[in-house]
Image: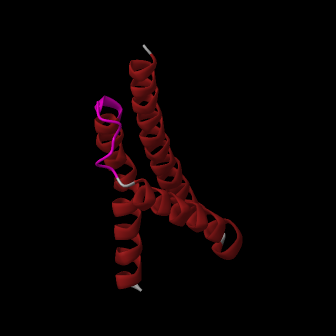
Amino acid sequence: MEIEYSIGFLYVVVNALRIVFYVPQVMAIARCQNGAVSNSLATWGYFAISHWVAVIYFTIGQRDHLALMISLGNAIAVSVLVGTILWRRDQKISRNTNRVST
């Protein structure tokens, strides 16, 4: 039983910290001047979908409130990251469109 507790504790710590580690990535994308083209929208979008599926799973399938909150935090954080990529790419397109029409 102690090994299960230890693994569960490790899961909580690692996944809770992952939320924090999204912040530098979001900040780097927000500062990016080239439309965040070096960030894979497909990869980050897939990560967002997987986290939202985990939220549904822990809500309906497991009813594990701690895992649900951690998954929800990760889902929100990576969704913010995806939104930031889209925002920067839209800004780049807008700048290029304005440059061409001027």
Residue 91: horizontal and vertical position, in percent?
Answer: 43, 28
Furthest residue toward front: 101
Instruction: Tell me if residue 64 can be seen.
Output: no
Total numbered labels: 0
The N terminus, quarter of image: bottom left
Side of 2 relative to 52 (left or right): left
Camera-nearest residue between 13 and 90: 90
Q: Outermost residue toward the right?
A: 60
Quarter of the rendering containing residue 32? top left
Residue 38 position within the rendered picture, expressed as x and y whole percent measured from the top left: 28, 48
For this rendering, which residue is in front, 78 or 74?
78
Question: Is residue 92 covered in magenta?
Answer: no
Point 34% across, 75% down: residue? 6
**Colour basis:** secondary structure
Judge left or right: residue 86 versus residue 55.
left
Name the spot of residue 99 as percent of width and height, x first: 38, 19
Q: Is residue 69 above or below residue 23?
A: below
Q: Is residue 29 above or below residue 14?
A: above
Residue at image position (44%, 59%) is 42
Residue 14 point in image, percent of width and height: 34, 62
Q: Quadrant of residue 96?
A: top left
- What residue span does the magenta drawing correspond to? 30-39
Residue drawn where x is 35% and y is 83% of the image: 3
Q: Main SS of the magenta segment?
A: loop
Q: Tell me the residue at 37%/82% (across/down).
A: 2
- Front-most of 30 and 98? 98
Q: Quadrant location of the C terminus?
A: top left
Answer yes or no: is residue 50 visible: yes
On the picture, is 45 further left or further right than 65? left
